[in-house]
Amino acid sequence: MISRRLSNSTLKALPASVAIPRYDRGGVAPGIVHLGVGAFHRAHQAAYVDDCLAAGEADWGIVGVSLRSPDTRDALAPQDGHYTLAIRSSVGEELRVVGSILSLLMAPEDPAAVLAALTDPRTRIVTLTITEKAYLRAAGGGLDNTHPDIVHDLANPQMPRTAHGFLTEALSRRRAAGIQPFTVLCCDNLPANGATLHRLLVEFAALRDARLATSGDARLAAHIADGVAFPSSMVDRIVPATTDADRARIAVELGVEDAWPVMTEPFCQWVVEDDFPAGRPAWEKFGVTMVGDVGPFEDMKLRLLNGSHSAIAYLGLLSGYDTVDRAFADPAIRQFVDGLWAEAIPTLPQDAGLDTAGYTAQLAERYSNTALAHRTAQIANDGSQKLPQRIVASALDRLGAGDPPAHLMLVVAAWIAACEARGKTLPEAHFTDPIDTRLTALGSRPAGETVTAIFDLAGFAKDHAHRMTLIDLTAAHLERLRRGGPAAAFAALGIGSEKP
């Protein structure tokens, strides 16, 4: 049994085949605070920063912050922040130890320490991967000012719980101290993510200002609106959940234990709007695309990759497939995904020079990676938060152009059917959604009533002229799924249902 842990003291004893940090971590200063230190951040942004540190940019180390769970901190703190990045393809695996995370903080345990890190003049960028649901948006897209955590943060600005509360209080403190604002870089799958976070934070600050109107400076919202940069970004890398088998395999390869290695694919993409008044690392030297407008890249990723990922997840679950590669190997699902792409591609900007043919060919190759074992249940989480930008937006654009979105709306129906299958043909908590409690309360209803109620709950196509068309299409698909499963739904689209 291996008893030693990956750490500063064991790095040099690792096999020569394992890449280790090529810089003196003792000379690295923190320049980035990251909110939401999950597996994706550690496979993506932290790896890019690691490359920059190795190139001598020693003032861009990362302070990682967990807003909810202590799991990452507890796993990595004994390892001095080190972890193994396992880059897996169908032909082999490459191991790399990443050292760019200098320290880890747990916000609920010590919010003061998080605020101190955010207020530190050395902190010039704050990045976020907190998932779509943590932005606490109401059905209309604005801030959910009734959410208990938002209410708490407005009443207790010194002890925040949310990203909104931490960012706003830190920007207030920096302003009072005459420290330049940090740049806020959103790395989550939100439409126009920088502008979206900017708007939400200004809304939050305005509510906070209203409370301070009679007791102090009430101009923070204007400061955030006009004086803080919120560049948008598009991120892309498939990062499956780490299993105990992964941990055991990595430990054998390293000769030491790594409590939380990260599995990923060779492909990695980051497109960033170049707006960093306080400075930034030279990311472009390591493959990051710095642009003036992220929008076209973001739309292509959301609608072609994320949209098809959701389709594969829900249809795969309903078809009995537990990983993406197995689901994508089903000829019917593969044919469906091709049809989904054919519907979504015309909704993308046609004058942006996007290579959609090359992009979808690359996606097909990535989905066929048998070594990755990306679980369909992992992708299925939080459908009510993800489907509006991944699927519904494309469907509305299709209808606006006079074209039917039949493949697109089957994805929404498959999500509903997969939710209904939990506790029946799928395990009870196989995947989760923020509106699960209200979904359960709906009970068993005819397809049309179910879809209408769910559109109301999730806010899909709210107040849009084509809303009823989407509901009717989704209800027809759901009825077929209930009656005959994916085979019946595919047959209605002219897709064969034979399996390999």
Image (spheres, helix red, strand yellow):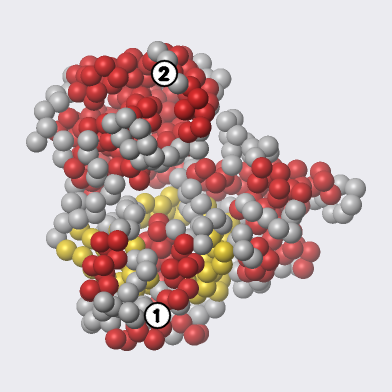
Q: Residue 309: image x %, image y %?
A: 31, 40
Q: Residue at x 65, y 63 (%)?
A: 111
Q: Which mark, residue 70? A: none
- Residue most toward the right? 214
Of residues 494 and 124, the one drawn nearer to the viewer in this rendering:
494
Q: Give the Cα separation between the discs numbered 1 and 2.
A: 53 Å
Q: Quadrant of the N terminus?
A: bottom left
| Residue at (11% x, 32% y) in the render | 499
- Where's residue 229, x and y in %? 61, 55
Q: Which circle marks residue 7 in the picture?
A: 1
Query: What is the quadrant of residue 404 in the picture?
Result: top left
Type of amino acid under label 1: Ser
Residue at image x 38%, y 31%?
419
The quadrant holding residue 389 is top left
Q: Label 2 belongs to which residue?
A: 444
Query: Is disc 2 surrounded by few (<14), some (14 to 19) or many (20+) residues within 10 Å?
Result: few
Q: Tell me the amino acid under the disc marked 2.
A: Ser
The furthest residue to the left: 500
